[in-house]
Image (cartoon, rainbow, N blue to C red):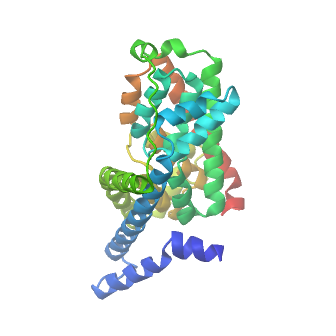
Amino acid sequence: MWSFIQDQVLGMKWLNEVIGTGVSLLGLDTASRWGGSLQFFLYDTAKITVLLCVLIFGISYIQSYFPPERSKKILGRFHGVWANIIGALLGTVTPFCSCSSIPLFIGFTSAGLPLGVTFSFLISSPMVDLGSLVLLMSIFGAKVAIVYVIMGLVIAVAGGTLIEKLHMKQYVEEFIRNAGSVDIDSPTLTQKERLTYAKDQAVSTFKKVFPYVLLGVGIGALIHNWIPESWITAVLGSRNPLGVVLAAVIGVPMYADIFGAIPVAEALLGKGALLGTVLAFMMAVTTLSLPSLIMLRKAVKPKLLTLFIGICTIGIILVGYLFNAIQPILI
């Protein structure tokens, strides 16, 4: 039953067969480069679009119960490492990309929440949202998805705890530290209003994310059908001990969320890249994109920004090597 759910419901393998048949009817051989690229592009675009819309709607509905004011009150009840854990878990029900999470991070910090807690939130939000769990299940299976989410939460909790222990609050920009905290009672939404909110969020997020989905799927199709497997294996395979580091470094300049990164990761894995190397690439793309770092620089000083980048990079690299070590168990 689980295999059916993973392959046919989440993975939509039936859709791949339907699209393959359609491509063949057009006179293209799906085993050829052009035919295979077209099949990969159409299948991954359709699959990710369906999952994207369903997941955004569902998560936005859940998010309607956790507006910033309520989230601040929830976080304020906890202290120590438990506060970091709650902050990281709260990040799993927030928007999908790092740039969307930074305004919430600034709001939480301005409201006086511990800096370590807000950084745990900031790290986990783009890296391990609920959408990533479902989408990773559809591509890599449940075991990989669950371990990925757990490792992402560990990075978020450890990173936030370290920042708190180092007392880095003085490296937050003054305008944020001095911002007044205004408590606003969250309105009680009706069921209809929650559904409308979820629909609006789904439409808005889809419009912003879909171009990156197309870009990611296009790159994935190129890798899947045009780049020789030997090249990928040589650079990101087991023979290159620095493959994880290289993947993490390559991922930083890119800007995409989990939906844009997964088609690229799927194609790399299919071409012989190691699982941990591929996941390190995904984590770097979603957590350390240049646009998000530029936005974050407006809120924190260079020393704190450098520490944040260092924590995330080291955590991502360690997770990558861990996944490579346990890949035979997971796949």
- In the rendered structure, the answer to whether residue 311 lies left or right of residue 195 reads right
Tell me what residue is drawn at x 64 percent, y 44 percent: 151
Residue 43: image x %, image y %? Answer: 39, 71
Tell me what residue is drawn at x 43 percent, y 17 percent: 180
Residue 259: image x %, image y %? Answer: 43, 55
Instruction: Give 157 or 288, whichever is nearer the viewer.
Output: 157
Give above or below for 108 relative to 178.
Answer: below
Q: Is residue 326 visible?
A: yes
Tell me what residue is drawn at x 37 percent, y 51 percent: 201
Quadrant containing the N terminus in the rendered view: bottom right
Residue 302: image x %, image y %? Answer: 44, 18
The quadrant where residue 113 appears: top right
Quadrant containing the C terminus in the rendered view: bottom right
Number of numbered discs present? 0
Instruction: Give 220 or 303, whichever is nearer the viewer.
Output: 303
Tell me what residue is drawn at x 42 percent, y 68 percent: 47
Q: Is residue 227 visible?
A: no
Give above or below for 192 relative to 181.
Answer: below
Give above or below for 146 relative to 101.
Answer: below
Residue 312: image x %, image y %? Answer: 55, 34
